[in-house]
């Protein structure tokens, strides 16, 4: 072997010295990165025990690094997630290049569990054998919570979209039926053959046109009212009102519908109730919607009962029927715009399905709430609670008498 020239020994010594210094600086940089990282870094021996934990343990795990050493970390893993946690470490020791696992971890001295994500990979020695496993762990609880919220929002949006599709399909029936009647009877009245009909028959046809037009206007008004409530454009004009006379008025308005359906209409409203400060038209809409719904879904011979009572600083109005009731799985959907208990296109009962949504929205405008209790086949009770003095009270704006079914919007 050829000997190096004179002076080469000194050169080689300097090279080795610089390499050693470089290795020292690299090790120092690596140590600074590990100790300054926000994620928890751990090193595991072949039996899974922690032999090193970075200072981030205090922030991520809620205890100092010493508390994770040995079996300290594994003892805090949720028992249901322990097999997946241990398997990821075992796979890394057995040659897998990288493994990732999520598990629940008991945080600090608290009894709550947080969701952790751990990514681990093997560290090999000069012979290529796995000497240890290094893992990087972070708290992903907030991320998982956000993902769940986004998933729930997406599912709610999809349900709302499907419900609106069903609603529009049903509305085609609600709108076409009265329109067909209006157009059909109007054409009949225009024909020359109608001059031969008796005046009573012509008046009957004209009455049918008027009834169909009134129904069509009610449907449109209901949609517009619900749209205003949803968009926040519907305001309330608060004034003192006695609830008993208003209940009497609403019952009188629904009495014809109840008589035609063979349903009894009962009132249990004390005359000495305190005055309710609320929007008269809104409370009237609430009562009419609840009473009409009760009559509609009650079989002949049944009853609809309306009661009211003062409870502290609130007025509680209850409309209870002996009708068909609502299935338990449908109750959570009621009161949501465009959601109906019966979403089939061919339904036994007519209506837009916006009644309870409107009641809920009008009650909320007063700072109140609506609650529904029902048993399938045994009737339904809808309770509306309104504060006697709404927090967002608005002064009454002087205006002329409004006709209930002839408002512009």
Image (cartoon, grey):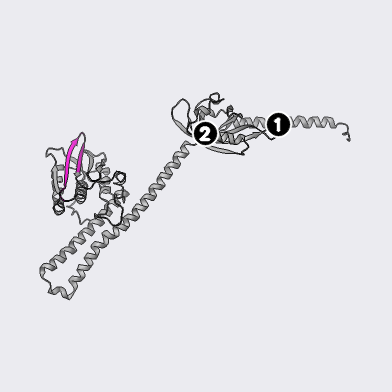
Determine if the magenta segment contains residue 121: no
First along the sequence among labels 1 and 2: 1
| Label 2 Cα neighbours within 10 Å, binned few <14 / some 14-19 / many ≥20 | few
- Residue at image x 37%, y 50%? 159
Name the residue nearer the viewer: 99 or 201.
99
Q: Which secondary structure, mark 2?
A: helix
Residue 135, located in which quarter of the rendered image?
A: top right
**Residue 121: assigned label:** none
Name the residue nearer the viewer: 243 or 209.
209
Q: Which secondary structure, mark 1?
A: helix
**Residue 83: assigned label:** 2
Name the image quarter holding the N terminus.
top right
Determine if the magenta segment contains residue 313: yes
Q: What segment is highlighted magenta in the picture?
A: 300-319
- Residue at image x 45%, y 31%? 113
- Residue 367 position within the rendered picture, expressed as x and y whole percent measured from the top left: 27, 40
59 sits left or right of 177 in the view? right
Number of labels in the image equals 2
Q: Are marks 1 and 2 in contact (CB under 8 Å)?
A: no
Q: Which residue is mark 1?
A: 23
Give the Cα distance between marks 1 and 2. 39 Å
């Amino acid at each position: 072997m050829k000997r190096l020239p004179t002076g080469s020994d000194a050169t080689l010594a300097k090279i080795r010295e610089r390499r050693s210094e470089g290795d020292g600086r690299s090790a120092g940089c690596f140590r600074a990165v590990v100790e300054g990282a926000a994620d928890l870094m751990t090193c595991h021996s072949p039996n899974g025990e922690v032999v090193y934990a970075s200072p981030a343990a205090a922030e991520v795990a809620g205890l100092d690094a010493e508390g994770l050493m040995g079996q300290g970390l594994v003892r805090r893993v949720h028992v249901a997630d322990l097999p997946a946690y241990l398997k990821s470490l075992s796979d890394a020791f057995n040659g897998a290049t990288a493994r990732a696992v999520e598990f629940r971890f008991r945080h600090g001295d608290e009894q709550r569990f947080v969701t952790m994500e751990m990514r681990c990979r093997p560290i090999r020695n000069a012979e290529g054998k796995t000497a240890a496993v290094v893992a990087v762990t972070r708290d992903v609880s907030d991320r998982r919570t956000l993902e769940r919220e986004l998933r729930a929002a997406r599912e709610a949006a999809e349900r709302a979209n499907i419900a609106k599709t069903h609603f529009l399909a049903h509305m085609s029936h609600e709108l076409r039926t009265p329109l067909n009647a209006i157009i059909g009877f109007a054409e009949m009245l225009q024909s020359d053959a109608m001059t031969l009909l008796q005046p009573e028959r012509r008046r009957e046809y004209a009455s049918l046109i008027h009834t169909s037009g009134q129904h069509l206007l009610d449907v449109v008004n209901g949609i517009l009212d619900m749209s205003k409530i949803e968009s926040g454009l519907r305001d309330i004009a608060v004034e003192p009102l006695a609830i008993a006379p208003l209940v009497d008025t609403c019952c009188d308005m629904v009495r014809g519908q109840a008589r035609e359906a063979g349903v009894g209409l009962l009132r249990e409203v004390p005359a000495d109730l305190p005055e309710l400060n609320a929007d008269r038209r809104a409370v009237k809409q609430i009562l009419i919607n609840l009473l009409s719904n009760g009559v509609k879904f009650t079989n002949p011979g049944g009853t609809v009962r309306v009661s009211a009572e003062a409870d502290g600083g609130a007025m509680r109005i209850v409309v209870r029927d002996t009708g068909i009731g609502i299935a338990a799985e449908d109750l959570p959907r009621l009161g949501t715009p465009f959601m109906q208990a019966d979403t089939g296109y061919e339904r036994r009962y007519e209506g837009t399905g916006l009644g309870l949504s409107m009641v809920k929205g009008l009650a909320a405008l007063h700072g109140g709430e609506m609650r529904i209790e029902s048993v399938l086949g045994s009737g339904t009770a809808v309770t509306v609670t309104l504060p006697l003095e709404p927090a967002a009270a608005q002064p009454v704006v002087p205006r002329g008498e409004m006709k209930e079914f002839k408002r512009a919007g």
